[in-house]
Image: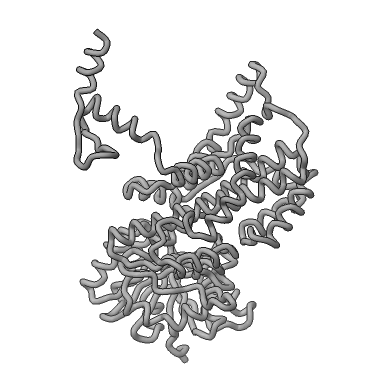
Amino acid sequence: MAPPKTRIGLAGLAVMGQNLALNIAEKGFPISVYNRTTSKVDETVERAKQEGNLPVYGYHDPESFVQSIQKPRVIIMLVKAGAPVDQTIKTLSGYLEKGDCIIDGGNEWYENTERREKAMAELGLLYLGMGVSGGEEGARNGPSLMPGGSFEAYKYIEDILLKVAAQVPDSGPCVTYVGKGGSGNFVKMIHNGIEYGDMQLIAEAYDVLKSVGKLSNEELQNVFAEWNRGELLSFLIEITADIFGIKDDKGDGYLVDKVLDKTGMKGTGKWTVQQAAELSVATPTIEASLDARFLSGLKEERVEAAKVFKSGGFGDILSDQPVDKQKLIDDVRKALYAAKICSYAQGMNLIRAKSIEKGWDLKLGELARIWKGGCIIRAIFLDRIKKAYDRNANLANLLVDPEFAKEIIDRQSAWRRVVCLAINSGISTPGMSASLAYFDSYRRERLPANLVQAQRDYFGAHTYERTDIEGSFHTEWFKLAKQSRS
């Protein structure tokens, strides 16, 4: 006898897809699953049996998979971004009927989602692009979900998403209808950009504590575990403490010291920085984190460069002055928190600029709320960001929210001490330094941009405005300079 029709389908059974399917089934929604490589289908069904006889039904061919789902059909795809998504849509849409819906849960470029939504609409199908954050563990136990696109499609599956998403006491499920078009994918992309910044800042804190403060892995584990009980309480700080405690199973010492210092990337950080440039939004912390990944990739060159500069008297650390460990730990904590505010401020400004450009009407406070649980950047501090936007939805920048402004003022001298110590020790802290430069530029009423504009007018007659008279002006700087020289 054929199994009853399922409530939803999922295509693409790599680890994220498997885990999300099991999560949906565990919440009481029977689910059909399909994968081009059929062994993954059997593997998922087997896992469903082992993890509590969950209602997961596997199909080896796309037609029977689609037919097994109740109408209007909803299918989530979790496949690699780009061409594989188009291929999966092509495979499935042949069997779908008007009013059915496809949801792309991958890290897709937002304009691809908008293109597909239009193409699907012509076939009478609905389409959603949904950011999913939380990694493998989040997908299984409760991710943060960022659906955008057809509101009608969202309404089809709202009941499922509200149960499947991470649940945060006092603030509810970590899902909301983000907005029209590719806004769900765009918001997930910026989430990943903020994540790049966050990870880089944590790595710099580690470098300063280890290289200058001479903290052992055991001490680092204790410090990060302690920080995770205060204002820095977050998933990334928690896993960092865990990493410092893991011994190497293939040799002596700790595993973190054997990991090659070369960071990989999938592209969302690069997209974030490209969008920042397109929209003329300053995101120096996120940009610094991307540059740090590029430089980390030059491992062989760095090994050679170290030899060149060592022979010229440059060691790894330039100054080896003894430091007050406890004071350094406290300063680094404050610097990390202040720099982190800048990274989130930049990400939020980028989301707002895109929302204005596209007419998406995105709610920044609501985005902060759905990032409080399930996702990689989840942190207690997001509650403060939500409250800042609740106080003032039109807040120009998180830095000028009265609470955040006070926190930065309280921490800025520690922040400067850490950056100066790093510079004098020859340790690069690009994220912390870029964040500090961002803060110092933003808080100054007058910048040296007047000179740059004067230069532009000198060589290119680009004109300039004045501080004392309305209008635009051009000066024959070259002639005047020539006259004054003669």
Q: Position of residue 233 (x, y in %)?
A: 64, 61
Q: Position of residue 251 (x, y in %)?
A: 78, 44
**Number of marks present in the image shown:** 0
Q: In this view, does 305 lie to the left or right of 159?
A: right
Q: In the rendered image, is residue 139 in sight? A: yes
Residue nearest the viewer, comparing 417 with 354: 417
Residue nearest the viewer, comparing 116 with 134: 134
How is the structure coloured here? one colour
Residue at 51 percent across and 71 percent down: it is: 41
Residue at 50 percent across and 48 percent down: it is: 265
Q: Is residue 40 above or below residue 314?
A: below
Q: Is residue 435 above or below residue 320?
A: below
Which quarter of the picture shows residue 70?
bottom left
Which quarter of the picture shows residue 429?
top right
Q: Is residue 286 left or right of residue 116?
A: right
Residue closest to the far front = 468
Q: Is residue 3 left or right of residue 92?
A: right
Q: In the rendered image, is residue 293 in sight? A: no
Q: Where is residue 415 in the image (x, y as percent from the top left)?
A: 61, 44
Q: Position of residue 230 (x, y in %)?
A: 68, 61
Q: Is residue 89 above or below residue 464?
A: below
Q: Quadrant of the C terminus?
A: top left
Q: Is residue 364 above or below residue 477?
A: below
Residue closest to the far top = 486
Residue at 28 percent across and 81 percent down: it is: 99
Residue at 43 percent across and 74 percent down: it is: 176
